[in-house]
Image (cartoon, rainbow, N blue to C red):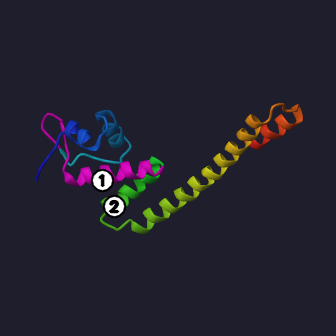
């Protein structure tokens, strides 16, 4: 079995050692074992879990939810349904954000395209931005 130190794992994942330690503090990822001097040692299994954490984070899942998924994965039970559910929820949130941003864009375009805006129109546009 091949073991890597924290710096090697951080480099493979494209993150800092500090981030890796933070994930350990959060209970997201634990080293496979420690050397006598306390250095953390990771295997391919932990690296794969780390890649899962990073993908889930990129999808916008909160770390608390990622931790629960990692616990399920680490237990050996397939987390496919739970993961799919969380991803679907995140997609719905993103679609809502896109809709809200589109409304914001349209309101801002209206504001820019008007040469003169009455105070009443400005208030109405600002209310639309909330």
Residue found at x 18% / y 39%: 5
Q: Position of residue 38 (x, y in %)?
A: 18, 35
Mark 2 / mark 1, whichever is N-terminal: 1
Where residue 128 is drawn, which disc sits there? none
Q: Is residue 100 above or below residue 121?
A: below
Is residue 113 rendered to the left or right of residue 12?
Answer: right
Q: Is residue 102 above or below residue 119?
A: below
Check disc 1 and report its element: helix, strand or loop: helix
Residue 114, located in which quarter of the rendered image? top right
Residue found at x 71% / y 38%: 108
Alpha carbons under labels 2 and 1: distance apart: 8 Å
17 or 104: which is nearer to us? 104
Q: Is residue 130 visible?
A: no
Q: Position of residue 13 (x, y in %)?
A: 28, 44
**Which residue is disc 2 drawn over?**
73
User: Which residues are the magenta region?
Assistant: 34-61
How many numbered marks are there? 2
Is residue 10 rendered to the left or right of residue 65?
Answer: left
Quick one: quadrant of the C terminus? top right
Q: Sort mark 2 into few (<14), some (14-19) or many (20+) by Cα contacts within 10 Å.
A: some
Q: Sort mark 1 into few (<14), some (14-19) or many (20+) by Cα contacts within 10 Å.
A: some
Q: Is residue 122 visible?
A: yes
Residue found at x 35% / y 48%: 28
Q: Position of residue 98 (x, y in %)?
A: 61, 51
**Which residue is disc 1 drawn over?**
49
Q: Do residues under tags 2 and 1 come within 8 Å of each other at their CB atoms?
A: yes
């Amino acid at each position: 079995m091949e073991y890597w130190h924290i710096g090697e794992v951080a480099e493979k994942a494209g993150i800092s050692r500090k981030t890796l330690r933070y994930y350990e503090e959060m209970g997201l990822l634990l080293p496979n074992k420690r050397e006598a001097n306390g250095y953390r040692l990771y295997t391919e299994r932990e690296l794969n879990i780390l890649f899962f954490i990073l993908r889930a984070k990129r999808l916008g899942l909160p770390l608390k939810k990622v931790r629960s998924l990692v616990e399920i994965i680490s237990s050996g039970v397939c987390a496919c349904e739970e993961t799919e559910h969380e991803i679907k929820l995140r997609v719905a949130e993103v679609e809502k954000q896109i809709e809200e941003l589109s409304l914001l864009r349209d309101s801002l375009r209206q504001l820019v395209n008007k040469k003169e805006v009455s105070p009443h129109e400005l208030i109405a546009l600002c209310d639309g931005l909330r």
